[in-house]
Image (cartoon, coloured by chain):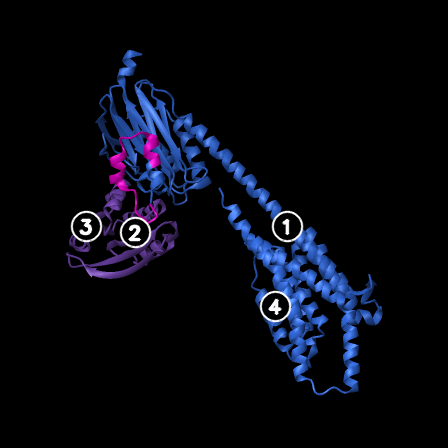
Chain colours: A purple, B blue
């Protein structure tokens, strides 16, 4: 069963004292999630510190990974956004590392450690 | 696949019920209406008796109506049965509903109910337009909503028989709308128009004698007598139309089925060709025992592999996975295999860079993972990886560097890693169809299970993942390093 992706946005204070925007994903991430995720990310209007929360995500297929990479590349292109990721299951932590996502976004265990660096 | 018989049985069961439903309807309807009449009727006098006799004679005269109504009812049932078994053919639904309401009109006529005649006429007008739109495959249908509203309004107002003309508005409106649709379609014809136009023309041609205006000029007959029964042109035309409509759409259904079979045949040919292509990618290379399994999730797959000898006696191995499935992924696979064959032997990182340049911006948001390994004669393995699963050796995943998948950004870099393969060791490449096989509970096969079975044969690994629950194409390529065979050769 494939579940639709939902994105909730919230703000948190990073260790550096600045505000970080957190996008919390839930459901499965696949090609159907493309607009939801890209719109949520673009809706942040280039916020400097972005944290992606995958705690509620069960499955990311290859198209889903392509979408995440697209988000990270967009952020990398501006050169002003830093992105951190947390809440991945060990399986997807490995998959994300395998496809080189860790070179564009730091992968963290939980929200606290993601915010501590952000 | 054996899906067809399951859907094929439903309409049969449904159609089997219809005669019973129809019989019950015929038995009960006149009885109920007669009861309703007798309840409301005042005590009979001579005038009323005369009236009843006249009514009875008229009803006998209108037996033709009953026969055509029954015929139309069965045609409507057949159409709805076809629709039940082929839901994508919406024309069967609208033709079925149209014939059903027309059949109801004739039942109402047989029973001398002007009120129900008008109500069903309004509804039939609604389905007449629906049917024309479905049959002629109109995609833009916003205009149909006001037409429907007018038809429904006509049906509601027809409840008050004193305003008998209400049902004429939907009839004329639907005729005009269908006429316009036909004209629009004639300008950009689709093959069906050739057949549907005459079918609808039958309806109009035989309805003409009923039109009071035309009758005032030319007194065309309403009826003809055949076999001792009085037949009305209108209902007979509808039966002809129903038969024609069923013939047209059944033919279309059969053609559609043939087209599906043809496409399935082409896919099957594609599958056979892909297996041959991939089989050709496994030359015999001294010192390596190569084994492969390729199990696409569909007919054709988006995984690929290639082994070819390099000029220095080494083997160049490429294993990869195009994101997405089916034909488009399979075509990308063919392109990649062709490109890999055309590229001159080079270090793995360079080959990946070249492939990435070729694919960047061409994959419509997709990507390709690929791992290329250079296996030298002495067992030294050099790899470059674009997001693919790392290979396994001795039941352990080999730790190698990885870059972004191919096709995402043209300036991706691919670092190389080097390790040594000892004689007797086997290098195992997989696609994520193994790791991400999923059971009914949504549990992934995962990296740990993959690691545990990675020392088994290619066939056993693929079977294990498939038995767990195949979701994606499964590829396993094993290369056993056996330099002794070279020495003894």
Residue at 24% x, 58% y is A21
User: Is the residue marked by circle 2 packed among few (<14), some (14-19), or many (20+) residues within 10 Å?
Assistant: some
Alpha carbons under labels 2 and 3: distance apart: 16 Å
Indicate the secondary structure of the residue bearing disc 3.
loop
Q: For residue B452, what is the image quadrant?
A: top left
Residue range corresponding to the magenta coloring: B439-463
Whether residue B164 sits left or right of residue B425 in the image: it is: right
What residue does disc 1 label?
Answer: B250
Against B128, residue B293 (above or below) is above
Q: Indicate yes or no whether the magenta region holds residue B414.
A: no
Alpha carbons under labels 3 and 1: distance apart: 61 Å
Alpha carbons under labels 4 and 3: distance apart: 60 Å
Alpha carbons under labels 1 and 4: distance apart: 28 Å
> Mark 4 falls within which chain?
B
What residue does disc 4 label?
Answer: B147
User: How far across and how far down the image is residue B426, in percent?
Assistant: 27, 26
Is residue A118 or residue A64 the one in the foreground? A64
In the rendered view of the protein, which quadrant contains the C terminus of chain B?
top left
Alpha carbons under labels 4 and 2: distance apart: 47 Å
Alpha carbons under labels 2 and 1: distance apart: 45 Å
Is residue B392 or residue B328 the one in the foreground? B392
> Mark 2 falls within which chain?
A
């Amino acid at each position: 069963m494939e579940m639709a992706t939902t994105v909730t946005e919230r703000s948190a204070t990073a260790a550096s004292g600045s505000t970080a925007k957190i996008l919390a994903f839930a459901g499965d991430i696949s090609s159907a999630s493309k607009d939801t995720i890209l719109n949520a990310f673009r809706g942040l209007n280039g916020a400097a510190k972005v944290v992606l929360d995958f705690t509620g995500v069960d499955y990311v297929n290859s198209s889903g990974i392509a979408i995440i990479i697209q988000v990270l590349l967009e952020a990398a292109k501006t050169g002003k956004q830093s992105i951190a990721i947390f809440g991945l299951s060990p399986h997807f932590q490995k998959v994300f590392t395998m496809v080189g996502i860790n070179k564009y976004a730091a992968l963290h265990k939980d929200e606290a450690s993601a915010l501590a660096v952000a | 696949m054996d899906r067809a018989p399951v859907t094929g049985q439903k309409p049969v069961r449904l159609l089997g019920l219809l005669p019973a439903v129809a019989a019950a309807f015929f038995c009960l309807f006149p009885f109920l209406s007669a009861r309703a009449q007798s309840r409301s009727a005042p005590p009979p006098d001579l005038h009323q008796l005369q009236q009843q006799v006249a009514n009875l004679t008229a009803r006998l005269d209108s037996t033709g109506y009953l026969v055509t109504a029954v015929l139309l009812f069965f045609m409507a049932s057949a159409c709805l049965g076809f629709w039940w078994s082929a839901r994508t053919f919406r024309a069967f639904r609208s033709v079925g509903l149209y014939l059903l309401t027309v059949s109801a009109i004739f039942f109402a006529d047989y029973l001398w109910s002007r009120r129900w005649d008008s109500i069903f006429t309004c509804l039939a007008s609604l389905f007449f337009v629906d049917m024309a739109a479905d049959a002629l495959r109109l995609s833009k249908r916003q205009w149909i909503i006001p037409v429907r509203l007018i038809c429904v309004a006509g049906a509601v107002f027809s409840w008050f028989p004193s305003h008998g003309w209400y049902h004429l508005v939907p009839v004329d409106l639907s005729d005009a709308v269908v006429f316009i649709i036909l004209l629009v379609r004639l300008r950009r014809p689709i093959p069906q128009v050739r057949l549907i136009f005459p079918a609808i023309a039958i309806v109009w041609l035989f309805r003409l004698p009923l039109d009071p205006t035309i009758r005032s000029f030319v007194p065309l007959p309403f009826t003809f007598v055949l076999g001792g029964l009085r037949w009305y042109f209108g209902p007979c035309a509808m039966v002809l139309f129903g038969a024609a409509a069923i013939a047209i759409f059944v033919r279309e259904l059969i053609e559609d089925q043939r087209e599906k079979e043809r496409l399935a045949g082409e896919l099957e040919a594609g599958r056979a060709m892909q297996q041959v292509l991939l089989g050709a990618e496994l030359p015999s290379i001294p010192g390596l025992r190569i084994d492969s399994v390729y199990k696409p999730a569909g007919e054709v797959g988006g995984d690929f592999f290639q082994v070819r000898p390099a000029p220095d006696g080494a083997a160049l191995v490429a294993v990869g996975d195009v994101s997405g499935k089916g034909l488009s992924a399979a075509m990308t696979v063919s392109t990649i295999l062709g490109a890999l064959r055309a590229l001159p032997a080079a270090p793995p990182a360079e080959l990946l860079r070249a492939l990435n340049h070729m694919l960047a911006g061409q994959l419509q948001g997709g990507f390709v993972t690929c791992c290329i390994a250079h296996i030298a004669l002495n067992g030294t393995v050099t790899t470059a990886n674009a997001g693919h699963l790392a290979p396994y050796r001795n039941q352990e995943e080999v730790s190698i560097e990885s870059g972004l998948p191919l096709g995402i950004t043209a300036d991706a870099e691919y670092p190389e890693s080097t390790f040594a393969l000892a004689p007797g060791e086997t290098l195992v490449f997989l696609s994520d169809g193994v790791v991400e096989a999923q059971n009914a509970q949504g549990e992934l096969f995962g990296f740990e299970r993959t690691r545990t079975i990675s020392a088994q044969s290619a066939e056993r690994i693929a079977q294990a993942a498939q038995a767990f629950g195949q979701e994606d194409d499964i590829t396993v390529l094993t290369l056993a390093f056996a330099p002794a065979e070279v020495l003894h050769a």
